[in-house]
Image (spheres, rainbow, N blue to C red):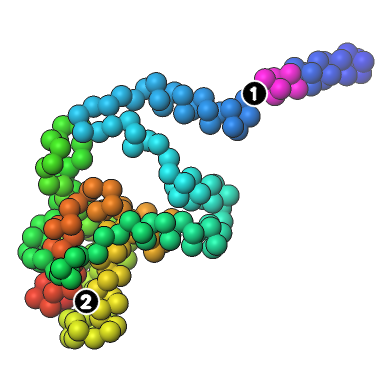
Amino acid sequence: MKNQTAIVFSTISLVLVAGCASVPGSAELDKITADIVKASFTDKGIVKVGVLNPEDINVACSAADVAGKPLDREIAAALEAVQLKTIKWPADGNYMGDWKKGESLAQSGRGLTWTDEAGEANGGNCYNCHKLDPKEISYGTIGPSLYNYGKIRGVTADPTSPSSKAMIEYTWGKIWNAKAYNACSVMPRAVHKGIITEAQARDLMALLLDPKSPVNQ
């Protein structure tokens, strides 16, 4: 009986070892997955398959996430420096638009689907992640509250001070390309990726920094 049991277990072990040997490795599984995705998706309307192509910064952040640890600080700094170069600063020095348009933009999540036409204005979908106006009954908490954004930072009191100038520039850059300041930020790179226009960025700036905006009341 003992001999038969030993033979059975030996046979099972051989089968398991053979089975494991045939299982693809991580790199091979990644390639299989990539091939499936490539074969399953096609360009449709304004949405192109190219959006699935990973960038170095996303690959690095995904790897760190899988490993369960923060991205190496030196690597993050190098990646952020590349992203910072993509930011276009206002040629005329004007960062502010219309806060009322900015509020409408923050409330809208419309756009960038295959049924939309190229060139149509998209929404900013800001309320999906942030609190801005306390009168808004629905907002997300993925990002920090932006209520009193300009007021807390002193921009509404004296927009000409050096600290206000620095905060205005930071806010512009953050809206343009959030990864320039945090490599693994989940905030969309709004202007850099063509989600919103430069003019719309000015309107969001006004929503956050204009003393008359509901954000700063």
Q: Is residue 49 above or below residue 18?
A: below
**Mark 2: amino acid:** Gly
Q: Is residue 31 above or below residue 15?
A: below
Q: In the image, residue 173 lies at what x, y percent?
A: 29, 64
Q: Residue at x 16, y 47 (%)?
A: 122
The span shown in magenta is 17-22
Q: In the image, residue 126 lies at what x, y percent?
A: 22, 57
The residue lying furthest to the front in this view is 91
- The residue that disc 1 covers is 23
Q: Nearer the viewer, residue 75 or 111?
A: 75
Q: Is residue 155 above or below residue 175?
A: below
- The residue that disc 2 covers is 150
| Mark pair 2, 1: CA separation | 56 Å
Query: Regarding mark 2 in the picture, which secondary structure is present there?
Result: helix
Query: Regarding mark 1 in the picture, which secondary structure is present there?
Result: loop
Q: Badges 2 and 1: C-beta atoms under 8 Å apart?
A: no
Q: In the image, residue 191 lies at what x, y percent?
A: 24, 53
Left or right: where 114 falls relative to 79: left
Q: Residue at x 55, y 62 (%)?
A: 74
Q: Earlier in the sequence, mark 2 or mark 1?
A: 1
